[in-house]
Image: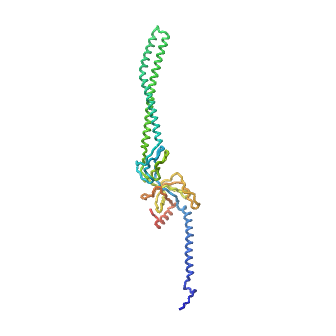
């Protein structure tokens, strides 16, 4: 049976036109998606600085640097990065050639003071022992002068000789007394100096504690400490300890802003998919620069100031040294719209 097909029948769809219309709709949808996506990107990228202030942040806490005022060499490092320590725990064992030289210098000083003190004590004893004889001789010369003074038979030469002996006797007594007094004073001064040096030596020994370096506070080692066998100059950190009980966020906000952040402003802290609310507690009077040299369109804004942020109580904070992003809306209206959108799309992961 033969059937005639009428291609011009309006009730029969043309398969070629159907495919063209479907492909055209797909192309128009893809084109519109690309155009509106680019438009939305530029609107959001260039319009967000007018809506909120955004900048990078770092989770931080008070840090205590453990160091020694000597040139030291680490013999045994007992902690690593991320270790938890308690106050008084041993962090490392060190050896210091500077401390050995210091002890040797103090010992030489003590030995020199002991020798000088012994010499002065000998002089003091000799002066005290000979002072009695000198005073007795002075008394004899005084009596001789009195007798010569009342005698009419003494010659002039004899009188001069007697007066010379009395003068020599007085000089000897004064010299012996002065030597004994000065030697006693020098001995007392040397004893005081010796005690001070001994106290300094004992204090240095107590501080060095035999090369045992202890943790002054309880906390976490956030950075890589010194290695076994490493030599450190005076003041170089052996390890750093952060207090995990007082955690806050340093927010580096850029120069380009419509309004300066103030203490008490509410902010949103973003860490991955988590969103935490917090407040600005301090505006620190210092500057820093974050970000490298990039293309002009995607270049990070230069950071000028730093603010300290504390999140709301009961919120679990990210680990120390984590990088976060902080947003601060300029108006309450935009903040409420953002909260509504976040709640609507289920993005409020705290």
Q: Position of residue 348 (x, y in %)?
A: 46, 64
Numbered label tally: 0
Quarter of the view holding residue 199: top left
Q: Residue at x 45, y 47 (%)?
A: 75
Relative height, residue 197 to residue 319 (above, below): above
Residue in view at x 56 percent, y 76 percent: 23
Residue beneath the point at 43% across and 36% down: 198
**Residue reaching furthest right?**
296
Q: Is residue 15 left or right of residue 188?
A: right
**Viewer-proximal residue, 261 or 332?**
261
Foreground of the two, 112 or 151: 112
Q: How is the image coloured?
A: rainbow
241 vs 257, nearest the viewer? 241
- The location of residue 167, given as percent across then percent down, is 48, 17
Reply above or below: 91 against 186: below
Quarter placement of the C terminus = bottom left
User: How far across and how far down the image is residue 143, in percent?
Assistant: 43, 14
Please identify the quarter of the rendering in which residue 128 is found: top left
- Using the rendered image of the protein, determine whether residue 161 is visible from the camera's viewpoint: yes
The percent coordinates of residue 165 (x first, y second) are 47, 16
Note whether 135 is above or below 249 in the view shown.
Answer: above
Residue 263 seen in this snapshot: no
Query: Hey, which residue is sitting farthest top in the picture?
Result: 153
């Amino acid at each position: 049976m033969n059937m005639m097909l009428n291609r011009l029948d309006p009730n029969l769809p043309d398969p070629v036109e159907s495919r063209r219309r479907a492909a055209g709709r797909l192309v128009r949808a893809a084109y519109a998606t690309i155009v509106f996506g680019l438009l939305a990107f530029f609107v959001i990228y260039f319009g967000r600085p007018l809506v909120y202030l955004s900048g990078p942040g770092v989770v931080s806490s008070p840090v205590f640097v453990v160091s020694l005022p000597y040139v030291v060499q680490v013999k045994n490092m007992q902690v690593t990065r991320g270790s938890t320590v308690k106050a008084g725990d041993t962090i490392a064992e060190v050896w210091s050639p500077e401390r050995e030289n210091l002890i040797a210098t103090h010992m030489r000083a003590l030995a020199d003071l002991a020798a000088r003190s012994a010499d002065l004590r000998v002089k003091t004893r000799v002066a005290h022992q000979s002072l009695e004889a000198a005073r007795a001789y002075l008394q004899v010369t005084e009596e001789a002068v009195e007798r010569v003074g009342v005698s009419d038979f003494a010659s002039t030469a004899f009188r001069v000789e007697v007066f010379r002996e009395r003068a020599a006797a007085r000089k000897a007594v004064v010299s012996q007394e002065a030597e004994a007094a000065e030697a006693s004073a020098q001995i007392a001064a040397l004893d005081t100096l010796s005690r001070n040096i001994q106290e300094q030596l004992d204090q240095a020994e107590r501080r060095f504690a035999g090369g045992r370096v202890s943790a002054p506070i309880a906390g976490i080692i956030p950075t890589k400490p010194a290695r076994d066998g490493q030599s450190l100059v005076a003041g170089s950190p052996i390890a750093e300890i952060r207090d995990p009980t007082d955690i806050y966020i340093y927010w580096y906000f850029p120069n380009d802003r419509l309004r300066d952040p103030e203490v008490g402003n509410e902010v949103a802290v973003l860490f991955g998919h988590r969103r935490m609310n917090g407040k600005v507690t301090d505006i620190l009077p210092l500057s820093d620069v974050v970000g490298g040299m990039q293309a002009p369109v995607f270049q990070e804004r230069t950071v000028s100031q730093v603010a300290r942020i504390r999140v709301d109580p009961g919120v679990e904070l990210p680990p120390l040294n984590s990088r976060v992003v902080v947003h601060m809306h300029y108006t309450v209206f935009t903040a409420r719209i953002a909260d509504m959108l976040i709640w609507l799309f289920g993005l409020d992961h705290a």
